[in-house]
Amino acid sequence: MKVQPHLIFSALAITIAGFTTGSAIAAIITDWNQGNVVNSGPNGSGVYVSTIYNKPTSDGSNANTSGYISYTLLEGAAPGLKVVNNALPNPDELDPAPGNPVDNCIMAAGPSSCNGEFQSGKRFKLDQTAFDPIDLVFNLDGSTFATDNDGFYRMFQKYGNNTGVVLGGYTIGLGFGIGDDFIASGADDGLSFIDFGFNPKESEFSSLFSQGLFGTDTRRDRLQGYFSAERSGFDLAMVTEDLFQTTGLFGGAFGYEALFSNWLSYSMVPDGYFYDDDGDPLTEAILMAHYDKASGQWIMNRALDADGNVLTIAEGNEGVAFATQMDVENELILQAANLNLAACINGAVPPVACLAGVGTIEDLAKFNVTYFTNPQAFSFADSFVDNDLAYTAYRDMATFTLRITARVVDVPEPGVLTLLLVGLILLSQRRIKEYIKGNSAQV
């Protein structure tokens, strides 16, 4: 059987095992430890933020941050992330994606559940703002699960680039404590990633850009991705048993790397023209065209039929080109001849299909990350309370840290840049001398 290139690396789960001698008791992740988190908001757009710092703090003083978790009250709740135990599957709300249902998860705070409907807001939104690690600390206790609970936690994470520069990928590692006090998990210390095999399901282990931009949903009647019918995302590989990282992008001729090179920041993503097919502001509008900076044109990869149904007509930058966004808008109005398309009006009754206009294509700066944790084998022997390794930052309870670090795009070392500059100067001087010599010989 031929294995797809982006699935050749192993899928992962996290296991927390005993650090000391003594009998092991199944460990339950109780909640997100916010000893290094400050909550604020809402801002003018109704967004709340839980800022993550590199030291324990109540107001951010004497500490630095490289990221935050954000949410709105439309689909989320404070503090933006929650741990769910014994999420008894409800057959009426199961996501039909492979690998579900799950018994436990770490997800966005809010009304959705581990096994909630597709696109029900399950992923917590983590944005990277600087280049130091983001440390998420989780509390543990020695409770036991019911016999029919497998003890696994599915991680529903969305990861965005808000650094202002392109990024080359990321690493996710395990350890204890935060910031300068962080101690990485070592070999055979009881904390490690576990190999699930060489052909994981996307719902088990993946790092993928929005399927609305790249991919084809074979399980649901949905449009193929705007830029490509092929999925695009990051390849993943083990570095050690306690660390995995991205190893590059995949996606084919119209994949993310082919179109945008590296992972863009929010401030760098192109504008798009959007169409709201149901007039509901709570559902996502459909991307119809994008602005291509290289050509200075608007490219339309989708079109409308006379009744306003969306059609895919091209991929990548191969769609119909228009000089302005107004030309795109006029074309959509002409195509949907049976509708009277106009700009969307908030609170329209009844809601009707409308033109949502121009906005940034935010999903080009963020993607979904999925993996599992399994803390069943954590040891709560009496001697564990004196284990400084596990209590580096938080001495009042057992914790572990999930460390997420952005990887900047590789650039030549300063010495290499200096050599290149010297070489260019010498080459220029040589060509100037040859030019003068040649002209002198003709006099």
Image: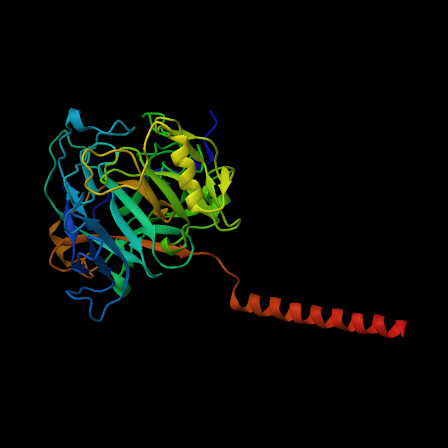
On the rendered image, what quadrant is the C terminus found in? Answer: bottom right
Residue lying at 24% horizontally and 60% vertically, measured from the top left: 178
Residue 112 in view in this figure: yes
Is 22 on the left-hand or right-hand side of 164?
Answer: left
x and y, in percent, of residue 75 in the image:
18, 43
| 22 to 99, vertically: above or below | below
In the image, 283 versus 155, the foreground residue is 283
Picture quadrant of residue 183 = bottom left
Is 290 on the left-hand or right-hand side of 42?
Answer: right
In the image, 9 versus 323, the foreground residue is 323
In the image, 420 versus 361, the foreground residue is 361
Residue 232 in view in this figure: no
Residue lying at 19% horizontally and 41% vertically, measured from the top left: 347
| 338 to 66, vertically: above or below | above
x and y, in percent, of residue 55 in the image:
22, 65
x and y, in percent, of residue 344 in the image:
27, 41
In the image, 16 versus 272, the foreground residue is 272
Picture quadrant of residue 133 = bottom left
x and y, in percent, of residue 8 in the image:
44, 36
| 269 to 9, vertically: above or below | below
Is 19 on the left-hand or right-hand side of 12?
Answer: left
Picture quadrant of residue 442 = bottom right
